[in-house]
Amino acid sequence: MANASLVIGNWKMNGSQALTRSMADALRAAVPSCGDTKVVVCPPYTLLAELTRHCYYDGIAVGAQNVNANENGAHTGEVSLTMLKELAVEYVIVGHSERRAMYGDDNSAVAAKVTAVTQAKLNAVLCVGEDKQQYDAGNTWQVVEQQLQAACAELTPEQAAKLVVAYEPIWAIGTGETATPAQAEEVHANIRQWLVKRFAAIGEKIEILYGGSVKADNAAELFAQQHIDGGLIGGASLKEDQFVAIVQAAQG
Ligand SMILES: O=C[C@H](O)COP(=O)(O)O
């Protein structure tokens, strides 16, 4: 049994055709069979086709970092779910804190995206998490609960089966400052309780990932926590050796 069932790399606005190929090769060589751990790589849109060409085999899936909830039409610069599906994308990150803070993804936009992604039968990776000020004020759970409530307001249990939740304390993203395993575990346990209350049996099965400065040297301890089902990895997912080591820590 793996320590963690899902590891997702979020390249953000980084990467190249060359990194796409070398990451695919590194993962293929180091983790030829990912066993119980699913590995997903989310590069920028422009690299999706290249990644699909190199990674389209069991165990490694392709993900996108965002999507437009509309089906098609006059939305200059946007990308639809149909377009992502044509590239064999299986996962879509929704509501990342960087999009919430810089690109206007408020709770209602996030809810529309989660609904659209799960309706299209892709996996929506819903990001939630508090900022430093909210953390210092002791409001972590209040913030996370509000984000969950807003994003899941319209979801049916069938759609919830395609949901993944990523808890990412904003103060730990790209800062090198990580929530301790115990801190993360406490929030994850609350998220699990909330999901079960909201979606009954399906809530037990929704994967809950931790994100925020996960590296090769802290991954195993985080993944060992009861309610941490895997990781959403930023910076370390751009380095082949780091990302492979994190996947191996997930495999146990
Ligand atoms: O999506 C990934 C998260 O924002 C975590 O990023 P990080 O691992 O660079 O802290």
Image (cartoon, rainbow, N blue to C red):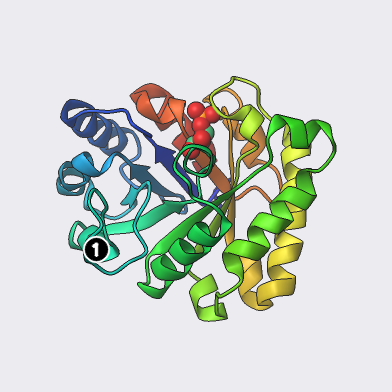
Secondary element at tag 1:
helix
Residue at x 65% of width, y 60% of height: 148
252 versus 136 height, above or below: below
8 versus 83 height, above or below: above
Residue at x 69% of width, y 73% of height: 198
Q: From this viewpoint, which residue is outermost toward the right?
A: 138
The residue under label 1 is which amino acid type?
Lys
Relative to the observer, which residue lies in front, 221 or 156?
156
174 versus 2 height, above or below: above
Q: Residue 220 occupies which quadrant of the picture?
A: top right
Q: Is residue 179 left or right of residue 5?
A: right
Residue 157 screen position, x and y as percent: 57, 79
Q: From this viewpoint, which residue is outermost toward the front?
A: 74
Residue wearing tag 1 = 85
Residue 23 screen position, x and y as percent: 27, 31
Q: Residue 175 occupies which quadrant of the picture?
A: top right
144 versus 150 height, above or below: above
Count up the numbered dots: 1
Residue at x 22% of width, y 33% of height: 20
Residue 88 screen position, x and y as percent: 23, 59
Q: Residue 153 occupies which quadrant of the picture?
A: bottom right
Q: Is residue 178 left or right of residue 87?
A: right
Residue at x 51% of width, y 72% of height: 161
Q: What is the quadrant of the C terminus in the image? A: top right
Residue 215 screen position, x and y as percent: 53, 26
Disc 1: residue Cβ within 8 A of ligand 1's nearest atom? no
Q: How dense is the environment of label 1, judged by Cα within 10 Å: few (below 14), some, or many (20 and up)?
A: some
Relative to the observer, which residue lies in front, 149 or 175?
149
Relative to the observer, which residue lies in front, 238 or 75?
75
Q: Is residue 182 left or right of residue 241?
A: right
